[in-house]
Structures are given as structure tokens and as C-alpha cells.
Amino acid sequence: MICQACGKNTATTHVKTVRNGELREYSLCGECAKRLGYGNLFAEFGKGLGFLGMRSPEITEEERCACGATWEDIVRSGKMGCAQCYETFYTRLLPVVERIHGSSRHRGKSPEGNLPQVAPKEEGGLLLVKKQQLKEAIETENFEEAVTLRDEIRMLEAKHHES
Amino acid sequence: MNPEKKWFAYAGKEQDVILNTQVFLSRNIEGIPFVRRLHTAEKQEVIGLVREVADSPQLSLSGLFTFISMETVSKAQAVSMAERGLVSPEYIARREGKGVLCSQDEALSIVLNGDDHLLLHTNRPGLDLEGAYDAADRLERILSKGLSFSFDSRFGYLTQNPANLGTGMHASLTLHLPALSASGSVPRIAASLSRLGMDLREGMAAEGEADIYRLTNRVSLGISEQEALFNLKSIGLQIVAQEREARKAFCETENGKDRICRAMGTLLYAQVLPQKEAMELLSSVYMGVSQGIFAKPEYSLLAEIMENVQPATLSLAVKSENSHTLDIARAKYIQERLQKAEKI
């Protein structure tokens, strides 16, 4: 089946939408799915480790979480099986989570409810921009600029934590 | 149509560009596998647990919600719920073990067994991230007195899709961008925002025809709720400013004014209006109101009209699924509402 968005690549994802009072299903290729916001994040980031020349953690036999999910299941469906999966597959998940969010450390509220919220200040928006500039500097191999930005970001974050 | 006043019938801030604000909080109950691994009976158990807490006289939610079972609503009702943004199209594709707890004004709802056990959803007219988040947060705190949510100190609130980890919060602003759309600027803006962890996407099918987009924070881990809301608001307001500039330029041309005035003319007098055309015309009129070309109708009325003319929603009110009948009903409804507004 050919992707209904670009008409070129093979369709791998099926997305639902509502049109003319009906539920419709559209078939999309990986690229178009990602572009329109329907990507499978594991397919994008989970399998790519090999290409980056990074060693995947050694897998001797197929690990299975208490809920029955295997890493294979997770990558194929793009969905975790249960809360325990995050522990069971922690090592393999960490880089995927980092790629999706640019971070792997929670900084929001917790069930105890009284964790202080990181209050945004002027630096909040500035930090976002600086982080973006850092990424671009790295991508364009402008490493001197990247080092300067990294130091600036560290200072801003230190100020954040003090308050 | 629906006589009770819904959340979008009220006025909001920056409503010339920001139609509404939504906040979504994803949560899962501790000790129960994620939705994908549950059989229908287990899903129904999850529904039972949440309903028990929602109906509990000890907590203050009693009487606030009505339960809509996806297993018993008709196909048109399910599609209408997706049209109104209560649930996603994906959600209504399979209906066993699913249901929604919904407040009467639809400003507050809990969607059960979609991507996660619970998806708390709040709606506010115009720009109101603080209000929408506050309501969602309060609801979450009350629910957490009766339910234990899966949480990890490293990954935050645990969700089926790792894209929702951390705060489990996705906030979004629904934006009307006819002028930026007309100038072809939106893809460029969307690309730069994507690098900042924000997504700017075209609204669902019919909304796309009315130049409606959604701005959402994509990143939820490594950032606090307040930070994410703050960033979304700053960027949202920047887009608002850009759209307003573009509109001024657009409406200064005779062609621009003509498009807007013709749209009002057609809406006031047409006898048959297909959905696509109606949405395009409503979009132009909405812009006309924002530029002072028309003194009426109010944004809230236009929002109400846009919602009620959606095909499945309209078919429920008119009790017909024949598309020609609907097109006639649509034209008549719009005419009545607009002409009434003119007289006030």
C-alpha cells in the first residue's frame, strides 16, 4: 500500500481521522507519519542505535517483563507494557527517552505534591533559546561557540536552582 | 442544538487569534498494566475504579461528571465526540472497555483507557493556560486521594507512550491563522518551533479548512509544568502578534476585504452550505470580526457555530444523515444564528 500523503513511499502506519461525519483511516509512510505527528518514537529512536555506532546492551536471551512484554513488542508497537517495563528495560530506554525529551530526569511535580515547581523567569525563555543555539552549534561543528553556550547554560541553570 | 451553555460559549482573552486552551494530563493506576495489555474485562475494571472515586461522597467530585460509555453510544455520537474534540479519532476506532467522564459544560473530562488509563482534559475559551492547568491539577489531586498513580522519581509519571513521560502534561493552544496561512508562512514557523520542542500542527480535517492550528508542547520530561506553560504562552503570544500583523496587511487590500465581506454575505443568505465551504467562510468572517470589519457576531457565537455545524454533530440534531439535508440544515442554522446576532 502506498502512502496516501506523499504517494511515493510504502505505507507503514495507519492513522485515524474524522472527516465528513465519518471515521476514516489513512495509510502513511514513516516520513509523512512523523511529519504529521503520528510517528512511532521507538521506530525512530529505538532501533537507530546500531547506525550511530553505539553498542546496544548485550542481549543473550529475550527478556520479558512481568507483564509479558518483550523489547521487541515495545519497539514494534511503540508502547510500553506496564510501569515495571521502565525498570526492566531501563538501559535500553534511557537513550530513547533522552532523544525524545532531550532529558531523562523528571523536574515537575510528584505525587507527594509538594515538590517546588521550577519557577520560570526571564531565563526560562532565554534558556530555551540558548539550548537550541547549542544544538545548532554542535550540528554545524562550531565547537568554540558550543563551549561558550554550554557554559552560559550551566550558569543560567545554576541560578535557576538557587531560587 | 444543545441548549446547555458549553465552555466555548464564554468569552476569553486574545480570542481574535487564540480560540481556546486545552490541558491534558496522562495518568496510569499503579499495579495495573498499561491499556494495550488489558483485556476488555480488565479495562472495565479500570473504569469501575475511576467511577467509584469520581462518585465518592467523601471527595468533592460527586455529581460533577456524567459517564458516557463508548460501548453504548451510537456511531454518530462517537464521531460527534471526536468532532467536538472530547476524544481523539483514534479513540473511537475501537470502543470496548472505553468511556468518558464528562462535566455538563464539557470543560472538564476524564477519558478512560485511551493511550493511558486516565487522560484528564480541560478546556478554556481564549488564552487561559493558568486556568486550564489549575483545573486539571485540582482534579488530579482529588483523584489521587482515591487512586495511586504510577510514578518514578527518574521518569516522572509513567505512561504507555514514552512521549508523555515526566509531567504527563501536554498543553495546547488552538490558533486561528488565516493570514499567516494565506502567506504560506506556517510551515516555516512550524519547523523552527519544532526545534524548540513545540509542535504547530493543522487542526483535524474540518478545522484545517478554517485555518485552525494547534500549538502544543512536545517535551514533558525534564521540564516543570510551570516552565512548559510559560514557554507555550510566550511562543503563543509571539505567533498571535505575527498573525495580527499579517491580518492588518491582508485586510488593507481590497481583495482581502472583498473575501471577508463576501463570506459574510454568503453565510447570511445561502440556502445550501457544504461543510468545507462553511468552514472557509466562517474563518473569513472570524477574521473580519477581529479586524473590526464587522461589529458582530461575537467570537463565542462563531465558536459555537463552528462546533455545531460539524457533520456528525449536526446529523444528531437534525436526525438525518443525508448530506444534502445536512447542507440545507447547516445553511439555515448559520443564517438564523447570524441574523439573530445582527439584531442585538
Image (cartoon, coloured by chain):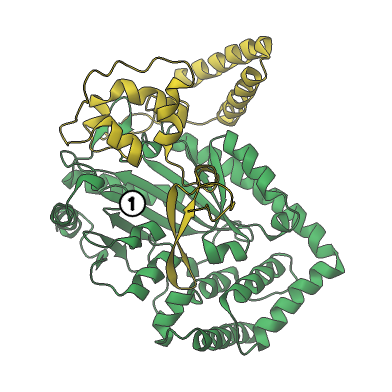
Chain colours: A yellow, B green
Residue B319 visible in rendering? yes
- Mark 1 falls on what kind of element? strand
- Judging from the image, mark 1 belongs to the subunit labelled B
Q: Quadrant of residue A77?
A: top left
Q: Is residue B273 above or below residue B283?
A: below
Picture residue at 23% right of the left edge, 58% below the top: B61
B66 or B340: which is nearer to us? B66
Disc 1 designates what residue? Answer: B120
In screen coordinates, is B263 left or right of A45? right
Residue B222 visible in rendering? no
Picture residue at 54% right of the left edge, 72% below the top: B306
In screen coordinates, is A11 left or right of B275? left
B68 or B66: which is nearer to us? B68
Q: Is residue B343 above or below residue A162?
A: below
Q: Give x and y (percent) for residue B81.
A: 38, 67
Q: Give x and y (percent) for residue B127.
A: 54, 53
Q: Residues within 10 Å of mark 1 (few under 14, many from 20)?
A: many
Q: Quadrant of residue B232?
A: top right
Q: Give x and y (percent) for residue A11.
A: 48, 49
Picture residue at 22% right of the left edge, 35% below the top: A69
